[in-house]
Amino acid sequence: AYGLDYNWNIQGFVTSSKGETISLSAIQDVERTAKQGTLKVEQTDSKAAAFDAKGLVGFNVYRDGVQINENVVIEPTYTDVPPIDGLYTYYVTAVYDACESVPSNEVTADFNVGINEESGMVSIYPNPATDVLNIKVSNDIREIKVYNYVGQVVYGTNVTSTKAIQINTSEYKAGTYLMQFTTEDGKTITKKVVIIK
């Protein structure tokens, strides 16, 4: 009814934290009004033509206007661990063989990772580190994970009898990392570590 010479379809889904997926019903017969002129669709740049012929490769994720994924994201989920606590704005673009879409809507998230400075449970040195990071933990710590700035786990270990651990950081990129320590009762302690080169 709008004079478009092609078929199109937008389908949305909502997934709950329990994994239940609900399909959103279609929006039909949307009224279009204009003060003057004619509504028409036209190609605005050379990238637009590529959408018709090229397939979807994946997605790019942006935090505060800066792309944070190193490789195109293929999965429909992405985990981000920001370098410091605060408010962050995110949007996503679709990546095609020859182009990238315009940004999605923006979403603002409040990250408060709850850095816990419980003395005696965790000791990290040196911080900042270059080639080696030494960790001493109390008897309550059962697991250690290190996350890079895009939320990928770059190190993980279960803590058994050894309470002194040494991590080789010589291959890590310079930047801020988050270390997450999980206690026996499931609580987490998060600390920031800086790697310099």
Image (spheres, rainbow, N blue to C red):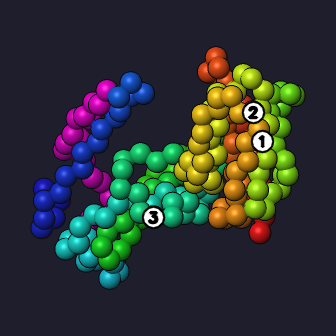
Q: What element carries label 1?
A: strand
Kind of residue indicated by mark 2 = Lys
Kind of residue indicated by mark 1 = Ile
Residue at the image position 86 percent from the left and 27 percent from the top: 120
Residue picked out by circle 1: 135
Residue picked out by circle 3: 71
Q: What element carries label 3?
A: loop
Circles 1 and 3: CB atoms closer than 8 Å: no
Instruction: Answer few, some or many: residues within 10 Å of disc 2's Cα (few below 14, many 20 plus, some between 14 and 19).
Output: some
Name the quadrant of the N terminus.
bottom left
Name which of mark 1 and mark 3 comes first in the sequence. 3
Query: Splitting the image into 4 quarters, where does residue 145 fall?
Result: top right
Residue 39 in the image: state x and y as whole percent: 26, 65
Name which of mark 1 and mark 2 comes first in the sequence. 1
Residue at the image position 23 percent from the left and 67 percent from the top: 55
Q: What stretch is highlighted in magenta?
A: 20-42
Determine whether 72 is above or below 98 in the image: above
Kind of residue indicated by mark 3 = Asn
Circles 2 and 3: CB atoms closer than 8 Å: no
CA–CA distance between discs 2 and 3? 36 Å
CA–CA distance between discs 1 and 2? 8 Å
Residue at the image position 31 percent from the left and 69 percent from the top: 96
Determine whether 102 is above or below 113 in the image: below
Residue 25 in the image: state x and y as whole percent: 22, 35
**Any mark on residue 163, and which?**
2
